[in-house]
Image (cartoon, coloured by chain):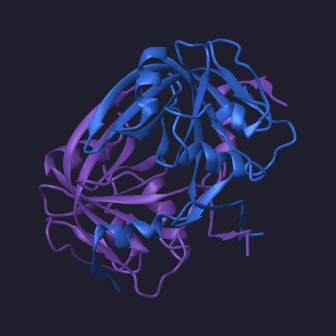
Chain colours: A purple, B blue
Amino acid sequence: MQRATSFNEALLKKYPEQVVIVLAKEESGRVNPVTIGWTMFTSHVPPMMAFSLGKQRYSIGVIRKAGEFVIAFPSEAQEKETLLFGTKSGRNTDKLAESGIATCPATVVDCLLLTDAVANFECRLAGEFKTGDHVIFAGEVVAAHVNPDSPGRLYTVGKGYIMSGISIKKA
Amino acid sequence: MQRATSFNEALLKKYPEQVVIVLAKEESGRVNPVTIGWTMFTSHVPPMMAFSLGKQRYSIGVIRKAGEFVIAFPSEAQEKETLLFGTKSGRNTDKLAESGIATCPATVVDCLLLTDAVANFECRLAGEFKTGDHVIFAGEVVAAHVNPDSPGRLYTVGKGYIMSGISIKKA
């Protein structure tokens, strides 16, 4: 059965929700990471991915100016860094430096990969689309990388940025 | 460490990926359900959700004509119906009738809710955005419903439409 409720209460049914980290290079040369839960793939040919970023976020301007970015899937061992990238702002923090997270150069776009992430997708900005208080950015994937150690993905599992790895119930 | 690979291999790192069922009413009065994995929330104020649908899919025309739809989160008990709605086409199948799934009327838009789903979001089409071989549809949520029994969400957990419920690793 269904019970009518507020959007905010129904929104809590979204968990577990995957998270990604979007990295883009600033004009200063510093790379800014931001954690995002509202993301999806959006094309096979050409390969494309999309994410929604709040209109007031510092990262919006960085991504627009750079015109390219990396989408990393953090591993379940990267909870602390993922939380930091989602709760601090690049306006007043060098988030990559503060986290000490391992990075390595991207191969096609001018940016960094997260060395210990599950996967990294190098993207060129393909377009944007305003949706309420967010903007959807779509990027074409121009290079992809995976972690051969195959760690599990990190998910937000409850309100207040509670994060965890998850297990599949079916054998 | 990271190893360069194809997009299609890196894409396999997306699992588990949540699935939703989008329902829209055809001019004939029949309601057509389609299962979609590429979906995200995209605004708090106003509340909005988005999903990506392949350009060739029958449901594209149905959603555009209806101008409104319901996004349901199937429960882990609805695997069989979710698979049917994602692999058969409304062009030649009355998918709701074939599945026998329980439905009840939506309250604001002219459509149906899935009675035993985790949650249902009634949406008005707010815009669309072409991305490669898919189209992103964005909808404004005008009513929301949850299942008081709180079943778990259903996820795709591997290639070939393997679906399962999931568990949180952290206590």
How many numbered dots are placed on residues in this image? 0
Q: Nearer the viewer, residue A142 or A15?
A: A142
Which residue in the rendered view is the most extreme toward the front?
B92
Please report the residue visible at 53 percent of the width from the left and 26 percent of the height from the top: B47
Residue A16: x percent and y percent? 64, 55
- The correct choice, above or below, for A74 with respect to A6 in the image is below
- The correct choice, above or below, for B122 with respect to A54 in the image is above
Residue B41: x percent and y percent? 51, 38
Q: Is residue A134 visible?
A: no
Say which quadrant the N terminus of chain B sits in.
bottom left
Q: Is residue A104 left or right of residue B13?
A: left
Q: Nearer the viewer, residue B99 or A23?
A: B99
Please report the residue visible at 25 percent of the width from the left and 50 percent of the height from the top: A139
Q: Is residue A82 left or right of residue B4?
A: right
Q: Is residue B69 left or right of residue B77?
A: left
- State which quadrant residue A44 falls in: bottom left
- State which quadrant residue B164 falls in: bottom right
Q: Nearer the viewer, residue A163 or B128?
A: B128
Please report the residue visible at 82 percent of the width from the left and 44 percent of the height from the top: B150
Say which quadrant the C terminus of chain B sits in.
bottom right
Residue B74: x percent and y percent? 69, 44
Q: Nearer the viewer, residue A134 or A149?
A: A149
- State which quadrant residue A35 falls in: bottom left
Residue B163: x percent and y percent? 64, 60
- The correct choice, above or below, for A98 with respect to A65 in the image is below
Q: Is residue B163 left or right of residue B10?
A: right
Q: Is residue A103 visible?
A: yes
- The correct choice, above or below, for A55 with respect to A21 in the image is above
